[in-house]
Amino acid sequence: MDLSFGPEYSAFRDTVRAFVTAHKDKQPTPGSAVKSSELLDWQTLLIEQGYHSRTIPTEYGGYGAEPDIIESRIIAEEFAREQMNTGLAGQGISMLTPMLLEMGTEQQKQKFIKPSIRGEIAWCQGYSEPGAGSDLASLTTKAELDGDEWVINGQKIWTSSAHIADWIFCLVRTEPEAPKHQGISFLLFEMNTPGIEIRPLVDMTGNANFNEVFFTDVRVPKHQIVGQRGQGWKVANAILGHERGSLAPPDAANSRLNGVIKLMQQETINGQCVIDNPIFRDRLMKLQGRVMAMQYNDMRLLSSRINKTQDAKLAGMVVKLIGTELRHEIEGLAIDVMGEIGLSYGDNPYLKGSGSWQYQYMYYLGLIIGGGTSQIQKNIISERGLDMPKEPKIQAKQGA
């Protein structure tokens, strides 16, 4: 039985492999500043060669290729094999852009997609609030129409990258009398608009990845709305679907797993390579199996975008839950492989990999909570994916 993709795809793999070989030493240095020339030049190169934004139409700045599941898989495999920088991601690219392609006006597509995928506009997401996290539809940040402008007042929290973002896509309540899911609108506006205050929040990685954002009489042009007024929940759900799929992609997990394998080939325990230790090798093999399962699940999702009759609803629901927990375990294995050096952090002179293993270990522990906790994801999977009964709600006691 021939399980190869065939000669056409073998030639395509050779092309991708040649690009990786020729350019792997020209990648941006890890931790390159946002909008640095080396990062933006690399992003432009990837798009022009079709290794990023591959199926986004050329009129919006993408490569313009037809969707091809096998080509996408080959690109991912070859980049992961060399732990190649796959280009920019982030909320504007992974979440906003696919939503605009589906639901945005032509003017919005022309204005935002090209500069977003090329890293010229950085975005943040204004969703969660102090009283509206898991129950997002309870948000209270309001926008009132005053002539040709929305006037926004309220607060958002856990706003990733707000301190470096140029624009925000934000959920606001525009119909206070409507049922909570029907009174929300989806606005786009610049982060340097007067009345916006940003307060960084330091997370367990030691960096300020999150922020509180306060809005006081922030004025936004009326036309900077996606979808219809009061129907932002539909837009929000489209975004959330893309968010859950982007938080822990299997290709990135495969790249990190390849990094663990290299560590296991280098590190020793009592003079023996860690990769030859049966306990560590068993852990590695289990993680390899889970990464492969996620990659094939990703192929199912890709094929469903082409074959619209294919039901991949459940396949999409499991990605965030399984992917974030898997990444946390991969990073944890690397830390264990390094032994006591794996506990080093910050400016420790014995730090390996610029501290990325320790950073990602803490980061993905946070992502198990962020973007919808694992407990919330399990409820979504059981209720919406498996049609199980809803979680029973505890009735409040009278007079309590």
Image (tube, grey):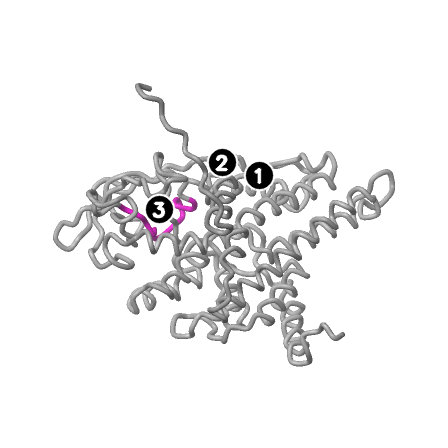
The residue carrying mark 2 is: 203
Image x and y of residue 210, in percent: 43, 40
Marks 3/1: CA distance?
23 Å
For the C terminus, the image quarter is top left
Q: Nearer the viewer, residue 94 or 202?
A: 94
Instruction: Provide the secondary structure element on which disc 1 rests.
Output: helix
Question: What residue sits 53% from the left and 49% below the top?
Answer: 320
Q: Is residue 127 left or right of residue 280?
A: left
Could you tell me which secondary element the residue under label 2 belongs to? loop
Residue 121's place in the image compared with 71, above or below, is above
Depth check: give the residue in front, 284 or 355.
Answer: 284
Query: Which type of secondary structure does the marked residue at label 3 adopt?
Result: strand
Circle 2/circle 1 CB separation < 8 Å: yes
Q: Residue at 61% of width from left, 43% of height from top?
A: 328
Q: Earlier in the sequence, mark 3 or mark 2?
A: 3
Residue 328 numbered mark, or none: none
Q: Which residues are magenta?
A: 160-172
Q: Pick whichever of labels 2 and 1 is earlier in the sequence.
A: 2
Q: Which callout, 3 or 2, points to the residue nearer the camera?
A: 3
- Tell me what residue is drawn at x 34 percent, y 40 percent: 156
**x and y percentages locating residue 362 in the rendered image:** 57, 39
Viewer-closest of 170 and 200: 170
Q: Which mark is residue 362?
A: 1
Neighbour class for label 1 at 10 Å: few (<14), some, many (≥20)? some
